[in-house]
Image (cartoon, rainbow, N blue to C red):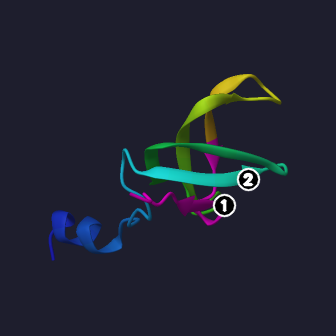
């Protein structure tokens, strides 16, 4: 097995795709946004997802949140 095969089999598989619409709650505050990145930096921290918000988050007035994938749900289109 070469290195390319090893990393293909053992790397983190993302839960969400870039650009996917999601919603969730952080600190009891609901939010809606778009996934920017779904990655795992280290095994100790685990996976994390950056979400580009539609409206700023009230606590820190930021348009980007970094949360765990378990916090998020896919936003459905009701056409």
From the viewer's side, name the closer residue of 34 and 1: 34
In front: label 2 or label 1: 2
Which residue is found at the position 44% from the left and 65% from the top? 15
The residue indicated by pointer 2 is: 25
Badge 2: how crowded within 10 Å, few (<14), some, or many (20+)?
Answer: few
- Read off the residue under disc 1: 71
Question: Closer to the camera, 36 or 48?
Answer: 36
Q: Is there CB contact under 8 Å for labels 2 and 1?
A: yes
> In what element is the residue under mark 1?
helix
What residue is shown at x 83% (from left), y 30% (from top)? 59
Classify mark 1: residues with Cα within 10 Å, few (<14), some (14-19) or many (20+): few
Q: Does the segment drawn in magenta span residue 67?
A: yes
Disc 2 is placed on an element classified as strand
Question: Going from the N terminus, do you reach mark 2 or mark 1 first?
Answer: 2
Q: Which mark is residue 52?
A: none
Q: What range of the chain is rendered magenta?
A: 66-79
Image quadrant in which the C terminus is located: bottom left
Q: Is residue 50 visible?
A: yes
Residue 65, given in percent of the width and then of the height, sits at 63, 38
Q: Can residue 46 be seen here?
A: no
Q: CA distance from mark 2 to mark 1?
A: 7 Å
Name the spot of residue 57 as percent of width and height, x first.
72, 31
Residue depicted at 28% across the width and 65% down the height: 7
């Amino acid at each position: 097995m070469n290195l390319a095969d090893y990393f293909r089999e053992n790397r983190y598989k993302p839960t969400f795709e870039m650009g996917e619409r999601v919603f969730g709650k952080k600190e009891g505050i609901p939010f809606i946004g778009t996934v920017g990145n779904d990655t795992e930096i280290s095994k100790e921290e685990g996976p994390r997802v950056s979400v580009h918000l539609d409206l700023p988050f009230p606590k820190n007035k930021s348009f980007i949140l970094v949360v765990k994938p378990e916090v998020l749900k896919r936003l459905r289109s009701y056409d």
